[in-house]
Image: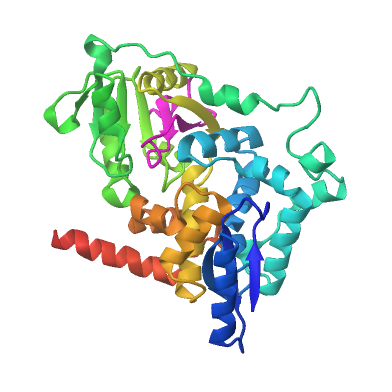
């Protein structure tokens, strides 16, 4: 049997207790009692590579590194989106610098090798290069950030405290056309609270500076956005949720791609920021109108390049998927996995809790989108998650 503590051990409340193949119940009971005497919350875990926390946390780093490596966003942008959009205490690059890039890379490499090159844990060449350069993070004075007197330390507090300039929309400027869909569930509340008037295309109202499509591909997004592009004045901006499709694919469905802007609709609730994406053909006017619109909703904007899954849907859904793989393989029960990630990794909520909040069908759709774009086993959906998605669909049909 083993006990896995988390650094700094005196502060972190969690300890994973690992049962070996021949471990007796008496030994497990003794370790549980020891953990309690030390003031720790204990969780029981099967003896598997990475146990619970180190294993399930891999996508938090791996997907962030890949997003940056593909040139979609900088490490500063990704950290800011993750903190301000999902409530994480630190972004993945800040956390890698704190842990030590060499330590984080070694953990990923170890799990990758122990699982016989499971694609979900493939290490990043970016980390490998930084380890070779001895850029380990805080302990070496430089990593993804610099840690000297003139470094970016303090930048984080500044960007969190900035508030966008909000203007009260009036007259026609306050009108927004919203097509039906479920991939921006908090949008209507934001519109109402910001005094916008939401109208529907089917009501015959077509004059508005902003048109929004929140439907997914399975909800008829292609037809809805083509219709909206047809009736909306050409000077109006067209906003499309991009959780399960890329903006470049959407652009092929319409006649006026120059006014098209993509956004992350899944992470608007309790958020301070919204992720937006454009194409090379997107006009400056459309970008400015999108900026102003979301600023009026009280949200900062983070502009990234078009990439499958954007930032938060991609990272979070991969975390949910890893949690579902772990639960399905019997590493630990779902409630134990969520508890371990909250206490051992300081996540704002457990990955499987997050999956229920987003909806298993949406999580599976994001993963299917990633798999379709990359054609990699890395993004295959966990069988248990697929089962949850089907049960969720059955439940919705019966309501």
* Left or right position of 387 against 197: right
Examine the rendering and report whether any part of residue 257 can be seen: yes
Task: Name the one closer to the observer, 310 or 54.
Answer: 54
Task: State whether residue 372 appears in this view.
Answer: no
In magenta segment, residue 274:
yes
Q: Which residues are magenta?
A: 256-283
Q: Residue at x 66, y 25 (%)?
A: 154
- In the image, 205: left or right of 182? left
* Point 56% across, 24% down: residue: 159
Indicate the position of residue 355 as horizontal and vertical percent values: 39, 55
User: Which quarter of the figure has residue 58?
Assistant: bottom right
Q: Quadrant of residue 397?
A: bottom left
Seen in the picture, residue 391 relative to 204 is either above or below; the reply is below
Residue 88 location, x and y as percent? 52, 42
The one of 12 and 345 positioned closer to us in this rendering: 12
Q: Position of residue 337 (x, y in %)?
A: 48, 64
Q: Camera-side residue: 142 or 246?
A: 142
The N terminus - image quarter: bottom right
Q: Is residue 316 left or right of residue 54?
A: left
| Residue 378 vertical position relative to residue 237 in the rendered view, above or below | below
- Residue 291, image x, y percentages: 44, 20
């Amino acid at each position: 049997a083993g006990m896995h503590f988390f650094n700094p051990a005196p502060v972190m409340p969690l300890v994973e207790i690992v049962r070996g193949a021949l471990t007796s119940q008496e030994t497990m009971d003794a370790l549980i009692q020891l953990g309690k005497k030390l003031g720790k919350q204990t969780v029981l875990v099967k003896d598997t590579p990475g146990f619970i926390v180190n294993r399930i946390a891999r996508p938090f780093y791996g997907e962030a590194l890949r997003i940056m490596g593909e040139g979609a966003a900088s490490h500063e942008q990704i950290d800011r989106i993750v903190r301000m959009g999902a409530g994480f205490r630190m972004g993945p690059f800040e956390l890698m610098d704190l842990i030590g890039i060499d330590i984080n890379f070694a953990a990923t490499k170890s799990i990758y090798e122990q699982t016989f090159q499971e694609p979900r844990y493939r290490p990043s060449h970016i980390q490998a290069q930084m380890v070779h350069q001895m850029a380990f993070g805080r302990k070496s004075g430089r990593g993804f950030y610099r840690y000297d007197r003139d470094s970016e330390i303090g930048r984080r507090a500044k960007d969190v405290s900035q508030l966008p300039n909000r203007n009260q929309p009036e007259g026609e400027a306050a009108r927004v056309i919203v097509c039906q869909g479920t991939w921006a569930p908090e949008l209507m509340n934001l519109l109402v609270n910001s005094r916008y008037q939401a109208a529907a295309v089917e009501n015959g109202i077509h004059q508005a500076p902003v048109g929004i499509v929140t439907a997914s591909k399975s909800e008829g997004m292609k037809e809805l956005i083509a219709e909206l592009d047809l009736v909306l004045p050409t000077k109006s901006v067209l906003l499309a949720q991009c959780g399960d499709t890329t903006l470049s694919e959407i652009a092929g469905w319409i006649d006026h791609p120059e006014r098209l802007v993509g956004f992350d609709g899944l992470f608007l609730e309790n958020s301070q920021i919204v992720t937006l994406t454009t194409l090379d053909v997107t006009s400056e006017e459309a970008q400015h109108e999108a900026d102003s619109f979301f600023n009026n909703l009280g949200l900062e904007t983070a502009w990234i390049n078009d990439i499958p899954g954007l930032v938060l849907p991609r990272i979070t859904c991969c975390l949910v998927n890893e949690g579902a793989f772990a639960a399905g393989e019997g590493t630990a029960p779902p409630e134990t996995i969520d508890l371990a990630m909250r206490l051992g990794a300081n996540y704002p909520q457990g990955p499987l809790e997050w999956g229920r909040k987003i909806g298993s069908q949406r999580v599976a759709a994001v993963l299917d989108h990633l798999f379709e774009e990359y054609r990699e086993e890395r993004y295959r959906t966990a069988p248990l998650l697929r089962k949850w998605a089907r049960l969720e669909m059955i439940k919705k049909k019966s309501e």
